[in-house]
Amino acid sequence: MRKVRVRFAPSPTGPLHMGGVRTALYNYLFAKKHGGDFLLRIEDTDQTRYVPGAEEYIIEALKWCGIEPNEGVGYGGDCAPYRQSERKPMYKPYAEQLVEKGWAYYAFDTSEDLDNIRKQAELAKMPNWQYNSISRMTMKNSLTMPVDEVQAKIAAGDPYVIRFKMPRNEEVRFQDLIRGWVVFSTNELDDKVLYKSDGMPTYHLANVVDDMTMNISHVIRGEEWLPSAPLHVMLYKAFEWEAPAFAHLPLILKPDGNGKLSKRDGDRLGFPVFPLEWKDPETGAISSGYREKGYFPKAFINMLLLLGWAPGNNQEIFTEQEMIDAFTIERIGKSGSKFDPDKTRWFNQQYLRNTPLPELAQALIPLMQEKGWVKEPSYVEGVCKLMMERAVFVADMLEGHYLFQAPVEYDKDAVAKKWKPGESGALMMEWKSVLETVEDFSHDGIDAAFKGFLQTKSLGMGAVMPLFRLMLTGTLTGPSSMDVAALIGKEEVMKRIDQGVKTLG
């Protein structure tokens, strides 16, 4: 049985879209599931679209997501180099081999020639003109020119491309692991350029040659590459190579309406579509990233896992090993999946709640330091314990600012509703005198004293608790007042009551 070897092969034309991350994830899980290899290849044959920093971004994004290749750009391996521009010398012989076998031909048509023909076709109301099995015989190529003229042009250094000679009246059939049998008619396919006049291969030739020479067993890629698949299948046939298995993933769709999720949708609706923040090297425009927004990488990956794949049960939260064990290509859907930003936030909330307190504290401490708040790690863990149920992101726990410093102002609506000048202050001072006698200053100890105080004063909880919370936090919302008091400690509680009564009168 052929060893499983899969690859993720992005082009460095900009930041990595979350759809690309999902493609990498599915390849990674498939390789891990079958004890195979996961490669990272950079397909930079189109140098006109190369964007500085994009390759580094791709590698850093995959590392942040925990999707690390065991072979490829930045990792090395037996099939190096893994950057197509560095493999440039190897492609021309393969293209010429196809010419020799009658599967390709030299074409000398200039870009001006092609533009003129397309314009003429439009005037003749034939807007979809193609360089194909019919039109090729009217063009300047090695199929229509004498052999000696072709050789003379090549020897003289005249620019040319090598095109694939797509046969006529044939069917291209292959079984997609997601979509079943896929059939194309060669009459609908044009003669794609395989080798460009600048000495670089096109995506089609480089893709197939690299997959073969790197022993790729399965090509798992986005649905947008499905129209290219028949040419790739024909190239394998022409080279007499064993083709890999193909699986074309469904699109990730925008949350509202139809169509593929784009950066514009994220900008319009207020969520990232890239794993990391990206600064455009030309314009300086910054696009937000999941990392900088405060998402856990595992939550981001867990969300992507279920955006096109279903486990067959109601499980939603997965460890990496559970992902590997459960993942199968057969459970990937054929149709696109709508991205749900609210569900993505939910995933992050679940991961936050299940993160051990010491880890949460370590994530929160740098954010505290930015605000000048310094506390012992054990205290920060206490903050996390109180705030984590209300938080979606680690930074949300800073909303409990009263856990780090005494209130400097008090909610005006809360004061107007609950605070009665003179009466409320006197009540809080009585409660303070009771608290001073509490030896077990824990939640339970404070709670027992509070209930005793209510009983002695013949008061209901609503007459005292909101005032106490106001003294501690400056607001009427947040975690249990008893928990807040126990965390900040008796001395701080006494100070805050004094300060609150003094401020509010």
Image (cartoon, grey):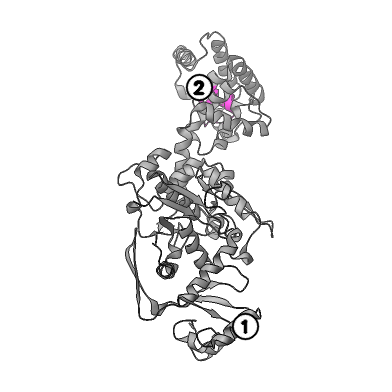
Q: Nearer the viewer, mark 2 or mark 1?
A: 1
Asked whether residue 326 is drawn in magenta, I would say no
Residue at image point 57% right, 18% down: 428
How far apart are the two marked residues, 2 and 1, measured between alpha carbons?
Answer: 85 Å
Tell me the number on the disc at residue 64.
Answer: none
Taking the image as shown, residue 17 lies to the left or right of residue 173, namely right
Q: Quadrant of the C terminus?
A: top right
Does 386 appear above or below 198?
A: above
Single out the residue that lies furthest toward the bottom: 124
Residue at image point 63% right, 79% down: 155
Report which residue position mark 1 lands on: 153
- The quarter of the picture where residue 381 lies is top right
The residue segment tinted magenta is: 466-484
Tell me the number on the disc at residue 483.
Answer: 2
Kindly identify the amino acid type of the residue bearing the numbered disc 1: Lys
Image location (x, y in percent) of residue 74: 58, 47
Image location (x, y in percent) of residue 115: 59, 83
Image location (x, y in percent) of residue 99: 49, 76
Residue 74 in view (yes/no): yes
